[in-house]
Image (cartoon, rainbow, N blue to C red):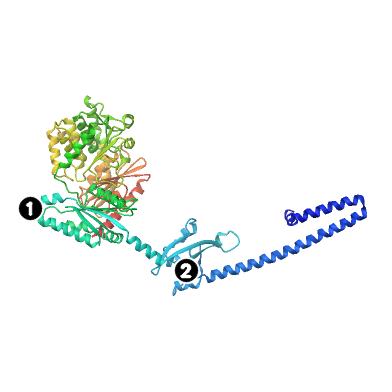
Amino acid sequence: MKNRWNKWSEVPELNIYLLIILALSLILMLYDRQVGMIALAMTLLLVLYNWHSSRRRNMRWSEYIEGLSKDMNWAAKKAVLSVPLPMLTMEMDGTVIWYNKHMGQLFKGLRLMGENISFYVPELDVKKLAVDEQTHVCRVVWKDRHYDVMYYVTQRGDREDSNKTVLMLYWIDVTDYALLQQNYAAKQPVVGLVYVDNYDEVMASAEEVNRPAIAAEVDKVITEWIASLNSAWCKYERDKYMLVFEHSQLDELERKRFDILDSIREIAISNRLAPTLSIGIGIEGESYAEEMAMARNAIDLALGRGGDQAVIRDREKFYFYGGKNRTVEKTSKVKSRVIAHALRGLMEPASKILIMSHELADFDSIGAAIGIWRGAANVGKKAHIVLDRGNPSIGTLLEEIKQHEEYADMLISSEQALDIVSADALVIVVDIQRASYTECPELLESGAKIVVIDHHRRPPDSIENATLAYLEPYASSTCEMVTEILQYISDKIKVEPLVAKALLAGIMVDTKNFAFKTGVRTFEAASLLRRMGADPTAVRQLFQDDFNTFTARAKAVTQAKIEFPGIAISVCPDELDGSNIIAAQAADTLINIKGIHTSFVLMPVNDEVYISGRSMGDVNVQLILEKLGGGGHLTMAGAQLTGVDINKAKEMLVNAIKEYLKEDSSKK
């Protein structure tokens, strides 16, 4: 009915006229029946004529549309068949069902019909093309030519049937444009900084007659390497260089994994200490100034991680090369004295001094915090240590602290710290550099001045807004660094035996009773603490385990498996509180077993998995665990995984070890 009315109303004005005439004819019949009948008959004739004319007009219009449609279909087919571009049609699974002559010439000599296009062009991810509604162009390379492949999803039939859905691909040759892009990218400038990490130490360790020769050889190796990059460069200090070169040279450096790091260590002219380099490179900056800032940030990170490595920074992340050797201890304590004076200058005007370390504080972190607390007291300032929950291993030390009245208000909770912190306060972070791992990250956002003291290698996401940062990866422990600071922070050193014992405990734990990562300054610090009243026997009593802890550690050791030659992996039982310290102790025990030089122990804690890594030095556990978001040192590192179970965590660890071993073997 509706369609009939639509046809009737195709010319609405004419229909209105006919209705008016019909109404007048009916009115006329009231006055003169004969004349009215004639008028009515004529009106019916007009209606019949209009219906016939409309029908004939509609038929002609339909014939015209059908003819036009045929012409359009023919034109579309003609355009598809004669388009001057390689083109093919394929099923949704990638099977080619048709292609034109240009595509045949492109794949000349190959059987294309009925084959899967991914077999010849793996870059074409057919599944991704079928579901990608945003991008309709992808770049592929075929026979050294670059093509932008434009693709469209269409239907073979009239119905929406997924079985009749096909992909049409047009290949546009963009080789000239692609090569221009590559050439432009290769010519982009790269800013680099090169520092000799231990120039003073190398010179001091060499005989005086050999020092000029060593300095000349170091300069020769570096300048020849810089010259090989075809770069513009300058030497602005005796051990510092700046250079600008093209990005194409950076690709070659990455391929060789910055072999200059190895070349510089091979310099040996009767010197007992080999020189090492740190390299910082900034790329993808919008200006030279921005790239220089990136390069400085990269070199600072390289030095903060112990040197002997190259760090590349772009606008989003860092890339690390090298850093697989032990850091070299610096014999000079000038920096410790400078830091101590700077720290005192920050303490004196501060309204509040808050000290915190990482979550689940251990002996090194709590010992360093207590040492800084004592340093603040030496300059006449009251300080507090923020501690919610420490490692169970430090429970004995904390109980001993609570027994002394003078330490009654030393420890406060995070809530208490947030209540008293202010913009003119001083927050001192020890033994950690990641804000998210600290005891109370909110303190770092309070606007207070921040000081960071740590002996770990600097991670990419370290605290960046610190007013003062004292980072020394060569140090055995943070307690060693704090002990040196205490010597210079005030004229009169006042350290109670309990404070000295806490500091010595931190040094002993991180050095495994002076067996690992110890240097001359480590023993000097321990000697100073001994003179201050630290009793090694009393310190050892702090490390005593209960029976359950000992058996849990033994269980973790017995469950270890040799996953790679010399590398053992185990899972710590989670039935005891404080399993993280048990895992660390188990990892220490494993590397004492003959045939094992590296160990990893995993420990599930609620919805997180902690990983402790230990090494005798053959494998850099820090580089491995950095791949999992962790960090530490060459011989001792850790990581914390969130939202994964123990099996997934172990799989991620194994993959990280494989990747590290692959990189290490490719370097050799």
Residue drawn 13% across the image and 57% down it: 216
- For label 1, the residue is 208
User: For the residues carrying marks 2 and 1, which lies nearer the camera in this image?
Assistant: 1
Q: Is residue 57 left or right of residue 301?
A: right
Q: Is residue 404 left or right of residue 181?
A: left
Instruction: Name the one closer to the observer, 39 or 68.
Output: 39
Between the C-alphas of marks 2 and 1, the distance is 74 Å
- For label 2, the residue is 115
Instruction: Tell me which label, 2 or 1, sits earlier in the chain.
Output: 2
Q: Is residue 122 left or right of residue 541?
A: right
Q: How many labels, in total?
A: 2
Query: Hey, which residue is sitting farthest left in the picture?
Result: 209
Image quarter of the C terminus: bottom left
Image quarter for residue 248?
bottom left
- Residue 98 lies, in percent from the top left, at 52, 69
Query: Hey, which residue is sitting farthest top in the picture?
Result: 405
- Label 1 sits on a secondary structure element that is helix
Residue drawn 60% across the image and 67% down it: 73
Instruction: Name the one closer to the observer, 551 or 185.
Output: 185
Residue 544 visible in this rendered orientation of the protein: no
Instruction: Name the one closer to the observer, 616 or 143.
Output: 143
Local packing at callout 2 (Cα closer than 10 Å; few below 14, some 14-19, many 20+) is: some
- Label 2 sits on a secondary structure element that is loop
- Residue 3 lies, in percent from the top left, at 72, 55
- Residue 220 lies, in percent from the top left, at 16, 59
Instruction: Name the one closer to the observer, 311 or 436.
Output: 311
Amino acid type, callout 1: Glu
Amino acid type, callout 2: Glu
